[in-house]
Amino acid sequence: MITPLSQQVDDLMSTLNKNDKSLMPRHIAIIMDGNNRYGDHHKLAKGEGHIAGKDALDPIVEYCVSTGIEVLTVFAFSSENWQRPPNEVALLMRLLALTINEQMPRMQKYRIRLRFIGDRSPLSSELQDLMTDAEQKTADFEAMTLVIAISYGGQWDVAHAAKTLAEQVLAGQLQIEDINKERLAAHVQLADAPAVDMLIRTGGEYRLSNFLLWQSAYAELFFTQTLWPDFTPNELEAMLTDFAQRQRRFGKTSEQVQVQDLS
């Protein structure tokens, strides 16, 4: 029997409250991998695995907002995905537009802000307009932020930030010696959001695939064999419980962290 979402949230919060050192992530990022393999495994028509993956996002979004997650970022289409077969790319673009339209009532119901990151220049003007409209209509919502990464790559992100700093130097607005990690961090995507605390990859692969490389510098990594369309709030709950038991040292020793927790 499937446990109701409200009971899942209550159980998780009860578990976390038993551990004084437990922490909930502020920002969760997910590489949603395994759609094609899901379709092959279930003998679905070409592309239907991606449709199943689109539908799997809804319960995860609702679960995250119910547990108090501030930001959920999902990898929908990478800068490298443009190399896929044209028919698949066209399908993914249609699904992205459909996802935005389908998510809007959910964003309004739960007061979730919708944002997009990535290089928009290769996208159709229609899709760009749809993204901008969704961002404007949800800009004042504060329950949670759902970020969809489209045409995004972590290396592009850092290079774009570096280019911005270089332009400031050329314009005489910044000195080279003033460039540091804080200034670069101010120009990457999601500069105004918390750093990624927890990065999840579904589908059985063990790599970051150029996703949020700067923002995930100290993220706790979670890998699962579960294909994205099969990923559920129950599995996310188990990961959150695991996350709460990890000691995040950020370069310090365990002893230093313990002293810090007691102070």
Image (cartoon, rainbow, N blue to C red):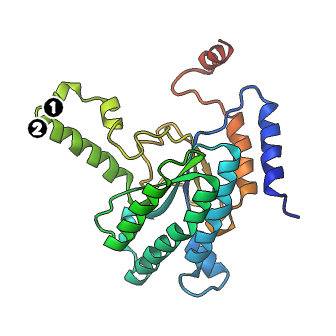
Q: Residue at x 11, y 37 (%)?
A: 171
Q: Residue at x 78, y 55 (%)?
A: 5
Q: Residue furthest right?
A: 1
Q: Give the percent coordinates (x, y) of residue 221.
A: 58, 45
Residue 37 left/right relative to 149: right
Q: Residues within 10 Å of mark 2 (few under 14, many from 20)?
A: few
Q: Is residue 158 above or below residue 127?
A: above
User: For the N terminus, which image quadrant?
Assistant: bottom right
What amino acid is labelled 1 in the image?
Gln
Q: Is residue 219 above or below residue 118?
A: above
Of residues 203 and 130, the one nearer the viewer is: 130
Q: Is residue 33 visible?
A: no
Q: Residue at x 63, y 85 (%)?
A: 44
User: For the C terminus, which image quadrant?
Assistant: top right
Q: Report the Cα–Cα distance between label 1 and label 2.
A: 8 Å
Task: Return the mark for residue 173.
Answer: 1
Q: Is residue 252 visible?
A: yes
Q: Is residue 107 above or below residue 167?
A: below
Which element carries disc 2, helix, strand or loop?
helix
Residue 232 left/right relative to 49: right
Q: Residue at x 52, y 42 (%)?
A: 196
Quarter residue 187 falls in: top left
Of residues 204 and 129, the one nearer the viewer is: 129
Q: Give the percent coordinates (x, y) of residue 200.
A: 59, 52
Quarter residue 120 falls in: bottom left
- Residue at which label 2 appears: 170
Is there a contact, CB below 8 Å, between mark 1 and mark 2?
no
What amino acid is labelled 2 in the image?
Leu
- Circle 1 or circle 2, nearest the eye: 1
Q: Give the percent coordinates (x, y) of residue 219.
A: 54, 40
